[in-house]
Amino acid sequence: MKFVFFGAPGAGKGTMAAKAATAFKLPHISTGEIFRGAMRAGTPLGLKVKAIVESGGLVSDELTVELVRDRLAQTDAQGGWLLDGFPRTMAQATALDSFCPEDYVIDLEVRDVKVIERLSGRRMCKGCGRIYHTKFMPSKNPDTCDDCGGAIYTRDDDKEESVRVRLENYRKQTSPLEAYYEKRGTLIRVDGEGDADSVWSVLHGVMQKLIDRT
Ligand code: ADP
Ligand code: ADP
Ligand code: ZN
């Protein structure tokens, strides 16, 4: 089964996709995490995208599409996947259609006020990418990851100026995809406003039903 996780920055896509990956044994493919990994490792890809990612801009469609096409061609993705953070533009959506169309798009609906509250407290592990929140999902120790002991940091693009740019980009370039998938009949809306346990409990049920149906 092939799921796209869709929603505003901060809606909870990464958090929910990580839970779904474990529950349904599907690879969690996050373009943001691929870019951040490349930046940390200082690879040519990382150096190329660093400035744009940190400022909150979108990496070019050409580069992003190629990266996803290669990733989806790998062995572990042949039985299905969870795409988190892709597609983000109409060009990316049509590219995905051409090489590996989704079965369903999970649209996590969260209002702007909540999204901003979530982004402003988001923390991330440098080692494993696990996502925390200072208030809503704190780590046991504020500086180290519960899972791997890695250092916990604030993403450069979660600073106020970049958040503004990202929400603007989302509105202009990404939110029109909702209508695109709705028209196709693959869009599944899920209320993402509750606490993480409640959202996950609803989402788990929704995904299980979709999987059972096929
Ligand atoms: P968010 O938590 O805001 O959903 P992500 O971790 O998905 O953020 O992405 C972080 C950054 O990586 C984006 O702001 C953008 O710079 C880049 N990025 C991720 N996915 C894409 C994509 N599909 N197209 C272009 N840029 C992307
Ligand atoms: P996205 O991938 O859509 O940008 P994340 O999964 O990174 O979103 O979540 C954004 C922030 O909100 C993180 O700090 C995360 O811990 C927190 N978060 C995620 N889901 C919830 C929820 N249902 N309630 C409260 N906080 C949440
Ligand atoms: Zn970790």
Image (spheres, rainbow, N blue to C red):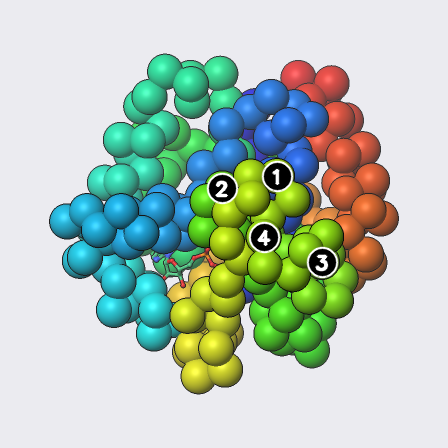
Compared with 108, 170 (above or below) is below
Precedes in sequence: disc 1 or disc 2: 2
- Amino acid type assigned to the residue bearing label 1 in the image: Asp
Check mark 2 vs ligand 3: CB closer than 8 Å? yes or no: yes
Residue 117: x and y in percent read: 67, 74
- In contact (CB < 8 Å): disc 1 and disc 3: no
Give coordinates of residue 195: x percent, y percent.
81, 56
Mark 3 or mark 1, which is nearer the start of the sequence? Answer: 3
Numbered badge on residue 138: 3
| Residue 147, label in figure | 1
- Mark 4 and mark 3: Cα distance apart in space: 11 Å
Q: Secondary structure at mark 2?
A: loop
Task: From the viewer's side, name the closer residue of 191 and 177.
Answer: 191
Q: Are marks 1 and 2 in contact (CB under 8 Å)?
A: yes
Mark 3, Cα crowd under 10 Å, few <14 / some 14-19 / many 20+, is: some
Between tags 2 and 4, which lies in front?
Answer: 4
How much space separates mark 2 and mark 4, taking CA atoms? 11 Å
Label ID, residue 144: 4
Regarding mark 1 in the picture, which secondary structure is present there?
loop
Q: CA distance from mark 1 to mark 2?
A: 8 Å
